[in-house]
Amino acid sequence: MNALKVIVILNLLISSNLYSQKIGVSLYAGANRTSISNYLIKERNPLDAKSEFGFLFGVKADYKLTSKLKFVSGLGLSNRTFSEPSFSPGQSRFFERMYFLEIPMMISLPLSKNFYTTFGLVNSYKFEGDTHFFWDNQDEILYGIDAQVIGGYKINRRFGLEAGVLYGSLLDHALSRLNFTNFVGSLCLTYKLK
């Protein structure tokens, strides 16, 4: 929680400083599909969790570091969802939904006139969820660091498409906490404000 506060304050300071300079601001919205890997799920049920569709949206700001290199940050909301078989025979699958506040800290590079790539780390804070894992203290995994790679295409001056792959949470693995991993694929429409 303290780490998230520091990151948010740092992000706001950087954003306010960059806003006075020349930056680009974009909105994005789209769908994602989350696959979950967790040894607790596999021990509990021979059938692995099934990936499901969720959503994501937010705002990104990019600051031109050089003629080609950009620093990208922002604020987004992501719903990562999967389903599992019910505990009781005959009942339908139940859905596990996790809601994340995401703050990217990434680098963007052009690949051609219309194509570009963005890659780096995403600070993810899980502020809500209805998961049914067998752990005693969910606070232990509320904050994570994810790695993400995005491929983008500029449709025109305002609109674009972005396809991304996210792997998380690196922080949980580094600290030897629960082996809880999100694999998230996403597809977004972007709209450039400035």
Image (spheres, grey):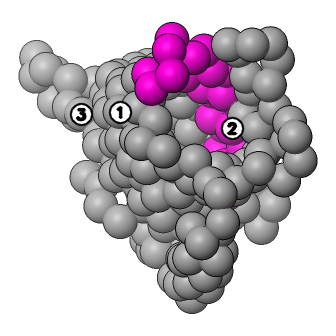
Q: Nearer the viewer, mark 2 or mark 3?
A: 2
Q: In the figure, 10 relative to 26: above or below?
A: below
Percent x, y of residue 154? 57, 17
Q: Which of marks 2 and 1 is in front?
A: 1
Which residue is depicted at the point 81% across and 32% down?
A: 109
Q: Quadrant of residue 95?
A: top left
Viewer-nearest residue: 12 or 66: 66
Q: Are there few (<14), some (14-19), or many (20+) residues within 10 Å of tag 2?
A: many
Q: Are there few (<14), some (14-19), or many (20+) residues within 10 Å of tag 1?
A: many
Q: What element carries label 3?
A: strand
Separation (CA) of disc 1 from disc 3? 22 Å
| Residue type beneath disc 3 | Phe
Q: Do the residues labelled 2 and 3 touch (CB within 8 Å)?
A: no
Left or right? Give the position of 48 relative to 169. Answer: left
Magenta span of residues: 144-168
Q: Residue 100 carries which label?
A: none
| Residue type beneath disc 2 | Gln
Left or right? Give the position of 39 relative to 52. Answer: right
Q: Give the labeled residue for mark 2.
A: 148
Q: Is mark 1 on a helix, strand or loop?
A: strand
Q: Is tag 1's residue or tag 3's residue first in the polypeptide sequence? A: 1
Q: Which of marks 1 and 3 is in front?
A: 1
Percent x, y of residue 175? 77, 67
Which residue is depicted at the point 81% across and 61% down?
A: 174
Separation (CA) of disc 2 from disc 1? 16 Å
Viewer-nearest residue: 189 or 89: 189
Q: Residue 29 carries which label?
A: 1
Left or right? Give the position of 168 relative to 90. Answer: right
Left or right? Give the position of 164 relative to 28. Answer: right
Q: Give the labeled residue for mark 3.
A: 95
Q: Is mark 2 on a helix, strand or loop?
A: strand
